[in-house]
Image: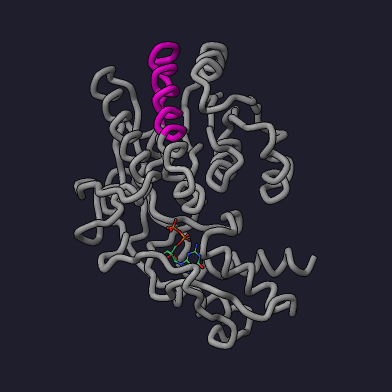
Amino acid sequence: MKRALITGITGQDGSYLAEHLLALGYEVHGLVRQTNLENASESHGKNLYERCKLHVVSLDSFHGLYRLISKVKFDECYHLGAVSFVGEHLADGFHTIFANTSGTHYLLAAIHEMQPTCRFYFAGSSEMFGRPTSAPQNEQTPFLPRNPYGISKVTSYHLVRNYRATYGMFCSTGILYNHESPRRRPEFVTRKITRAVARIKSGRQTQLELGNLEARRDWGYAPDYVRAMHLMLNHSEPLDLVVATGVIHTVRDFCEVAFAHAGLDWKKYVVTNPRFFRDEDAIPLQGNPAAIKQALNWQPTKSFEEIVCEMVDHDCAVENR
Ligand code: GDP
């Protein structure tokens, strides 16, 4: 039986990955901060965390990570834990950069010293491209991060490359574009929209305030993306790969599909509020998944419309409970 460690196990990706690995017969371990478990178990698969072995260890603590990795032998480590949401990381850039880069570095150092055969996956992000000069982006596109989160991800990416080059460790970075699901945190625009649709449908809300409706993203399906993570660590060689659909849609497209699925006309409910506007770029974050398709035969299983409808159905079911 293979044994895996997941940091960020209580997040959207961590929960799907834990389920995926359990279904494949893995023994799944996860790092948690004691305080965030209650919220997680409520929104994620029931009893999921009872089937995992959880360790209260902070990514800020080299000592804690070192002790865990010297005690338990892991075959694979998926490092998903990070300070991630835009509001959070702009508010405290020092903390974002420090926590995200040192967490990656501590894990790599502990694995290198105690279990150099453990394979390591690092959750990179399209934010590493920041303000790209061309679209779609691929593995050769230069990184131009534009916020502390993006900078922390680029730094971690270089740490991963260095441990691979210097020590021959099997470590890979997945450069993941936005990926959504009913477990997406409501601060993200997709979940904000699908939750609002459910509330408007039930009469508990009358309008939805959004920022730029023309903002574009390459939106994929979170369970497809955790499958990509596992494929990356089970490939014959470590690779850094873009994980994306290659297709972009606007926030307006998302609204159209989401409201229509509930039998509503989005134009009657959506208003824009400058409070939610952000600087948008002429060149969108759009990934080119050619390399991962070629190397790992990875394909997304759900279309944009299917993802939106699944999220709306979920939120309507929660609303009507
Ligand atoms: P991220 O910015 O890629 O991490 O993901 P978000 O879901 O927060 O935002 C995706 C896009 O939607 C961005 O271009 C936002 O500017 C745009 N957007 C438009 N209206 C909103 C809104 O009300 N909330 C958020 N979070 N994003 C919005």
Return the x and y of residue 158 as percentages of the image width and height. Answer: 28, 32
Q: What residue lies at 36% left-to-right and 55% top-to-bottom?
A: 244
Within the magenta stretch, is there residue 286? no
Q: Which quadrant is home to the N terminus?
A: top right
Q: Which quadrant is home to the C terminus?
A: bottom right
Identify the image quadrant of residue 27.
top right
Horizontal arrangement in the rendering, residue 118 relative to residue 63 (left or right): left
Horizontal arrangement in the rendering, residue 48 relative to residue 99 (left or right): right
Q: Is residue 137 above or below residue 59?
A: below
Return the x and y of residue 284 as percentages of the image width and height. Answer: 30, 64
Return the x and y of residue 207 as percentages of the image width and height. Answer: 62, 79
Within the magenta stretch, is there residue 99? yes
Secondary structure mostly seen in the magenta stretch: helix
Q: Is residue 246 above or below residue 193?
A: above
Horizontal arrangement in the rendering, residue 297 relative to residue 8 (left or right): left
| Residue nearest the observer in this picture, 315 or 295 | 315
Q: What residue lies at 45% left-to-right and 77% top-to-bottom?
A: 252
Q: In this view, does 237 lie above or below 82?
A: above
Q: What residue lies at 70% left-to-right and 73% top-to-bottom?
A: 199
Specify how the rendered protein is coloured.
one colour
- Specify the segment rendered in magenta: 98-120
Q: What residue lies at 60% left-to-right and 54% top-to-bottom?
A: 183
Return the x and y of residue 305 as percentages of the image width and height. Answer: 49, 71
Identify the image quadrant of residue 112.
top left
Identify the image quadrant of residue 96.
top left
| Residue nearest the observer in this picture, 67 or 74 | 67
